[in-house]
Image (cartoon, rainbow, N blue to C red):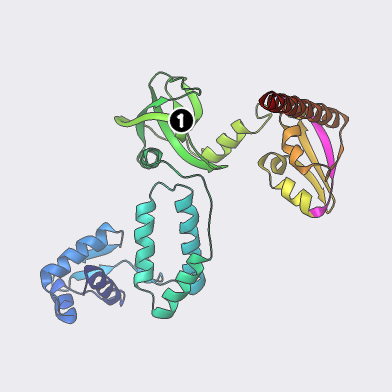
Amino acid sequence: MTKADNMLSILWMLRSGKRMTAKQLAEELELHVRTVYRCMDSLCASGVPIVADSGPNGGYRILSRFVDSPLVFDADEQKGLLHASVFAREAGYPHSEALTRAMDKLKRYANEKQLDELERHGEGLSVIYPPIDGKYRSFLQLLEEATGQGRTLEMEYDRGKGEASPSRLFDPYGIVYWKGSWYAVGHCGYRGELRSFRVDRIVRLRETENRFRRPQGFSAKQFLLGNLLPGSDGTAEYEIVRIGGQEQVLNELCRHWLFGHALTEREPELAVFRLERSTLLTYVPYFLMPYSTALTIESELLVRRMAEAGAGITAHYEAMLADLERRKGDEHE
């Protein structure tokens, strides 16, 4: 048998609840006693709560909380784990190799019918995300490990347009995956405040000997959303915007990160949003452009700005078309 098979056999025997010595296990499973010791070390390293009691009635045993928990997953649980692993890997999960090993173990101990079902469900689900560069995957691993260990990192960061910022000490409180990008949230030693950083803009990252303690109750997710969403500082002016359209169209609109967070009322063919006024003058019109004439908007400010934006786009492409026609005429001459 393989080492994995030996470990599983020992685990099943100890789940009976009685103490067993290494010699008893070796005799029962027809293994060398040194093989039993090696398997015990591996089981303990993997997190199994095995206790070794000394004395005449001593031996190995498993803590009751582990004995009472199931060692196998039903079909729906296996499918859920498989699909979750697909999402995680495609999103650039920093410990994808460990995840792959875990799924291999799940398949290894599945019977033929279960394995066939797992393979079919695995092939039936696909996830499309931007590929994660190997360099940034290693950064994610380092950030996640530092978050769990409370270890300060030294970071060099690209502020955009290739402009590097000074090296800084960074206490990572958490990593967040949002809208196709990974963010690191924590205390920035350079600014002396809480900051969020795009992982794909990190130039260099290394461990230090410094330690930190994450504030109790801190949520990296809430901090990030509070900084990315408009009006997070509480000083913004808002306007109520009523948008009508077919139910399917409005469902799609409400799934957008900006409109989903701003939704205040919803009916089958009507959605009411509380939007920051400054966004109505900047990027909201361009988010709505792809819907063409499928929407009716009750906001004079937004409709006027969309008309201006549409006219600007029309003028841009009319000028481009005129230039193309001019160059085509020059070529014929």
Q: Nearer the viewer, residue 309 or 87?
A: 309
Q: Which residue is mark 1?
A: 201
Q: Which corner quadrant holds the N terminus? A: bottom left
Residue displayed at 46% across by 68% down: 78
Residue displayed at 35% across by 73% down: 109
Q: Secondary structure at mark 1?
A: helix
> Residue 134: image x %, image y %?
37, 42
In the picture as drawn, the residue positioned furthest to the front comes out as 333
> Residue 325: image x %, image y %?
73, 28
Q: Is residue 42 above or below residue 203?
A: below
Q: Is 257 in the magenta?
A: no
| Crowding at mark 1 (Cα within 10 Å: few <14, some 14-19, many 20+) | some
Residue displayed at 57% across by 42% down: 179
The mark total stands at 1
Q: Which corner quadrant holds the C terminus? A: top right
Name the residue type under label 1. Arg
Q: Is residue 68 above or below residue 193?
A: below
In the displayed structure, does residue 1 sit left or right of residue 159?
A: left
Q: Is 243 in the magenta?
A: yes
Q: Which residues are magenta?
A: 236-247
Residue displayed at 61% across by 32% down: 228
> Residue 144: image x %, image y %?
40, 42
In the displayed structure, does residue 67 sit left or right of residue 327?
A: left
In the displayed structure, does residue 151 sit left or right of residue 199?
A: left
- Image quadrant assignment for residue 235: top right
- Image quadrant assignment for residue 158: top left
Residue 219 visible in image: no
Residue 333 visible in image: yes
